[in-house]
Amino acid sequence: MLSKFLRESMSSRHSKIEQHPLQNDLAHGTISKEKYAKYLQGLLSYHRGFETALKKHINDAPLKGIVDHEYFMIDRLEKDLIELGFSCESGSNGNSNGGDVSVENPLELLGILYVILGSKHGGKYMSKMLSDKMGSEYHHHYLDPFGTKLGALWSKFVADIDALPLSDEERNTVLKGAISAYDAFTHSSDLAVAK
């Protein structure tokens, strides 16, 4: 199964990013609004490049029939930044990993989407911690975009990708995309804590 292959192949990366200082601050609700905004700006830059490619290839195999319109996050990131009182100009934080995203292989795009959607499980918890610290007026649209629908949405996505008849080479291409997504999360985390 593709989901098991991806989960096992990336377990060390998953553990590593959880230990990142910024991710630790998010998980404990101790991040400043400024660092949180810088992190979201970096992710916005990344999503702008990724989602442009995803829309371009949405009807190509293996993405066709798997990608739902709810999976797009740019509007949510922009709403978060506006509510926090920060710019949606993602380039302003010096992020060179965003609009430059040039992934065009649908298999790699699927791997990126797997990581982004999977991150919403931890994001749901982070959103609650941040609301406790920052106040309930902030919803954290990016971290917790699906609310109570997350479980069903994730189960359907996993079932869809596990049903794909992929070769070993194709699975490795999906993994390549997933690794690039972890690298983007790490890059945005690094930028947010940089002096």
Image (cartoon, rainbow, N blue to C red):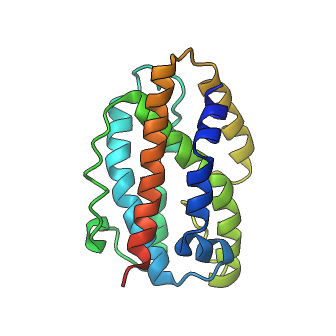
Who's the residue at 59% across and 40% down the image? 9
* Left or right: 114, with 4 as reference point: left
Q: Is residue 14 above or below residue 5?
A: below
Foreground residue among 27 and 56: 27
Q: Position of residue 92 (x, y in %)?
A: 27, 72
Q: Position of residue 44 (x, y in %)?
A: 39, 60
Q: Position of residue 194 (x, y in %)?
A: 38, 79
Foreground residue among 33 and 3: 3
Q: Quadrant of the C terminus?
A: bottom left
Foreground residue among 67 and 164: 164
Image-quadrant location for residue 25: bottom right
* Whether residue 73 is visible: no
Who's the residue at 43% across and 39% down the image? 177
Q: Is residue 108 above or below residue 119?
A: above
Q: Position of residue 154 (x, y in %)?
A: 67, 39
Q: Is residue 86 above or below residue 91?
A: below
Image-quadrant location for residue 30: bottom right
* Left or right: 170, with 29 as reference point: left
